[in-house]
Amino acid sequence: MALIEIDNLSVTFTAKGRPVHAVRGVSLAVGERESYGLVGESGSGKSTILRAICGLAPVSGGTIRIGGQPLPEPRGRAFSRQVQMVFQDPYASLHPRHTIDRTLSEPLAIHGIGETDARVVRALEDVGLPASFRFRFPHQLSGGQRQRVAIARALMLEPKILLLDEPTSALDASVQAETLNLLNRLRAERGLTFLMVSHDLAVIDHMCDRILVMQHGQAVEELPREALAAAAMKTAYAQSLFAASADRMLES
Amino acid sequence: MAELAAWLRDPSPKSRLQARLGQGYMGWLRFRRNPLAMIGLLIVMLLLVVAALAPVLAPHDPITQDLRMRLLPPLTEGHILGTDDFGRDILSRLIMGSRITLFIIAMVAVTAPLFGMLVGTVAGYFGGLVDEVLMRLTDIFLAFPKLILALALVAVLGPGMENAVLAIALTSWPPYARVARAETLTVRNSDYIAAVRLQGAGAGRIILGHVMPMCLPSVIIRVTLDMAGVILIAAGLGFLGLGVQPPMPEWGAMISAGRKYLFEQWWVATMPGLAIFIVSLGFNLLGDGLRDVLDPRNSGK
């Protein structure tokens, strides 16, 4: 049975009195320990799916199940321990007036988990940051370092599922590779399940076992990684998306 | 000293305390570059010192009357700023009055911004009906001229220092609510709030621990800039006889008492007026300086 099951999901926002259909009837299933990618251009609704899972976007139709259970509304603490998210922009996802220590210990405080000091130090270690960074503020860190803190924060509650919303698109190329390798290593070590969003097929190719190509809020095509590597897409849109980032994929 | 500065500047602090003090030190360095703000700080510090040491500094008893010495001009032997219509030394009264002024400022500065911030952040965070109700309430308070509303409140509660403080606090919270709500609206949809919500944090925790720290700088700036206004309202209430009651040496009441002699014995009203002017100016300059340091849009430089 799949760990994440999304069935015919629709998300509709209201903007200036008119309904905007961000996601229209998308279904997908992600197995345990699988890494699943959502690809598409800006506005294709891929990030919205992640936000809908987290309860940050209004679901207008369909169901989302984690481990066979429909998600409660509001999401609640049990959900927090199962699913965490890494946001796209590491400059916006860390509280500017909290030290790294505060950012990492907050989830522990919320869930009443003890041994704060030991856990925070270990979390920094796990994402490859020196312990001396613990009491720094986000503005004293580089983008890549901030994203590592964000990853550490997402892992503080030891979730099974990590939602990754373009985790590297705000970083430069060399830091991108480091961060992706870190994520791959953590997935292997902890048996995590990834649901990852990206507009960059090179990143997806590096990270994901299966991908879903999206356009205008709808699913276009689902492919296994082998099909991506062999450029064996069936739809024209997926092919054009592949062509746009093919040269960089060959490099890596 | 050099060691302390190095400890404060350490880019990788070893403890929470060091991180916080280090941030404070950086702010202080930025603040120090602004000479006008330093003048403001100096005036406010001076007010604090004078108020703390008032009984020692005052050369005469501020309350004992001596009609033989009434209305002496400034620079008279023993009465540098002259005496008032009851023969009381004006300098002594100003010095003792600084305590009253500081008390009013402190009480208002503690209550009004806290209340306003709570209303503003709650309204901004929850939005919808909560926002509507709280903000319309704020609008009602804002629609009254401050002094008139304070006057009405004091008239109902009865004159006196505590009631004056209460009246001023009740009339000065709405701007803080506005400021805090505006800040809350800019941060409530940010990723770091979404992140902490995703970790299962409740509304109380998010508002107090994550939203309020973002509102605090603008509210603090607003408070220091408003302090001048608070002093003036307190003086105004005193002037109208609704604030601190005689013979207590409140600055506004002193101006009011000197009004009768304004043309012949100008110093009776002018000296407390100057004191109010200087302290108000001090808070304004301090507020401007703090804005440069605390404004989140400038931090990180």
Image (cartoon, coloured by chain):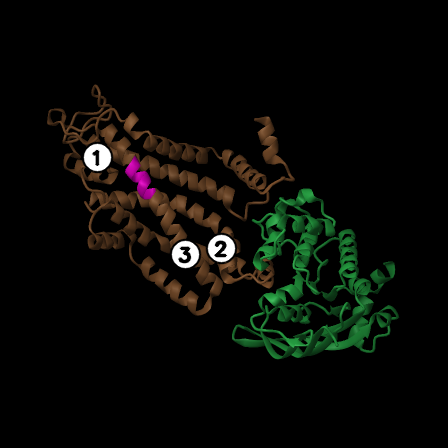
Chain colours: A green, B brown
- Residue B89 placed where, x, y %? 21, 27
Residue A221 drawn above or below residue B286: below
Location of residue A42 by image quarter: bottom right
Q: Amino acid at mark 3?
A: Ala
| Pointer 1 with pointer 3, Cβ within 8 A | no
Q: Secondary structure at mark 3?
A: helix
- Marks 1 and 3, how far apart at CA: 36 Å
* Mark 3 chain: B
* Nearer to the camera, B118 or B251: B118
Q: Dot 1: within a 10 Å radius of its alpha carbon, few (fewer than 14), some, or many (20 or more) residues?
A: many
- Marks 2 and 1, how far apart at CA: 45 Å
* Mark 2 chain: B
Residue B177: image tag: 3
Is label 1 on the same chain as label 3?
yes
| Pointer 2 with pointer 3, Cβ within 8 A | no
Name the residue: 76% across, 52% down: A175
- In front: mark 2 or mark 1? 2
